[in-house]
Image: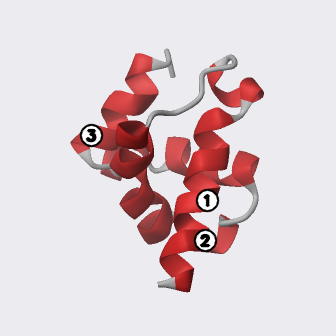
Amino acid sequence: MRYLSIVAFGVVAMLSSGAVFAQHSGTKEEQSACSRDAQRFCRKDLGNDGAVQSCLQMKRASLSRSCKKVFESHGM
């Protein structure tokens, strides 16, 4: 449970980063859409918001549809 909280915090921080999404605070739905992908593909980067975002972008072809939509909705 603690690990899931850390993952969720990392995704929340990533989605709310001004540099990442131009001052857009990620909704709970957006956070939920990418949390499994962050845990699956970017586990080593959790805790480093910029690294998680970069990792998810590099793994974009493998992301879930819902996480891809989050990136697309922010012009990424």
Kindly indicate the quadrant of the structure image that contains residue 46: bottom right
Q: Residues within 10 Å of mark 2 (few under 14, many from 20)?
A: some
Per the rendering, the mark at residue 66 is 3
What residue sits right under mark 2 in the picture? 6
- Say which label, 3 or 1, has the lower sequence index: 1
Q: In the shown orientation, is residue 18 left or right of residue 1?
A: right
Please tell me how many numbered marks the rendered image carries: 3
Q: Position of residue 19 (x, y in %)?
A: 76, 26
What amino acid is labelled 2 in the image? Ile
Residue 49 in view (yes/no): yes
Q: Position of residue 40 (x, y in %)?
A: 42, 69
In the rendered image, the vertical position of residue 75 relative to residue 18, given as above or below: above
Front residue of 13/55: it is 13
**Residue that extends furthest to the left in the rendered view of this protein:** 65
Q: Position of residue 52 (x, y in %)?
A: 63, 53
**Which numbered disc, 2 or 3, marks the residue closer to the eye?**
2
Per the rendering, the mark at residue 9 is 1
Front residue of 23/76: it is 23
Q: Are dots 1 and 2 in contact, CB under 8 Å? A: yes
